[in-house]
Amino acid sequence: MPTPPSSPLPLVVLLSGRGSNFQALLHAIQAGRLNAVIRAVISNRPGAAGLAMADQAGISTAVVDHREYEDRESYDTALRIAIDAHAPALVVLAGFMRILTPAFVRHYEGRLINIHPSLLPRFRGLDTHARALQEGVTEHGASVHYVTEELDGGPVILQARVAVHPGDTEELLAVRVLKEEHRLYPAAVELIASGRIRWREHRVWLDGKPLETPLLLDHDLQSIP
Ligand code: GRF
């Protein structure tokens, strides 16, 4: 007898702006390539374009505006309450431009992931494309990782590589990387939704074995969403 399909993984997406990674996740769900459901999109910025897209798609939205809170602790407490109202199994940071407090990160240990526009551990932090060009690397890309207290330092699940071409500008490179991000994030979330990737004992496991090095899109994944 075929095994019944498992229920979709409930997500809450956090974003601050454009929201193209949120849109990529939504498209993958709508196309049946990602077994998940986006229960809410939450932003720290009222004008975030991603909020309008979520609204149009009939997804619940909320704004927790950082300007209304005195400090990071009170902000993160309010954010946690807004998120937990939707009881997500996974919280997905998709261009959420806030540094999170250790208490917040600990609360979501193993349930909080981020996408970062570089091949981590290279180029943590901001301006990754400009820094990659400055250093003259020939390969750049994007990473999906679990969030830990170390900024952009949590264990990486899946990466996508792009070549850096002679004459590349920051803008050209940003476009090339973003295109890969839109394939990468749904693929990484599906690894979690399907139970292939799990967080246990403070580390990442793939198919029941500790994941020692990040998976590479198109190399380590037979079929990608
Ligand atoms: C992406 O480049 C992502 O890697 C970074 O923030 C950007 C968000 O873009 N964390 P978008 O809002 O998803 O279009």
Image: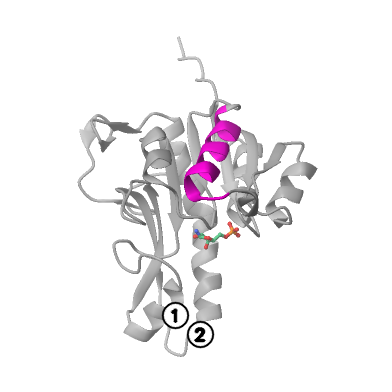
Would you say residue 75 sits in the magenta stretch? yes
Front of the two marks 1 and 2: 1
Name, please, the residue furthest toward the bottom: 167
Residue range (magenta): 70-84
Assess disc 1: are there few (<14), some (14-19) or many (≥20) residues with their C-alpha within 10 Å of its C-alpha.
some
**So how many labels did they put on this image?**
2
72 displayed left or right of 106: right
**Residue located 39% across and 41% down the image:** 105
Residue with the mark numbered 2: 169
Q: Is residue 224 visible?
A: no
Q: Is residue 200 above or below residue 97?
A: above
Please, what secondary structure does the residue beneath circle 1 have?
A: helix
Q: Is 65 situated above or below 180?
A: above
Magenta residues: mostly which secondary structure? helix
Between 217 and 38, which is closer to the camera in this rendering?
A: 38
Q: Give residue 222's position: percent from left, percent from top.
A: 38, 44
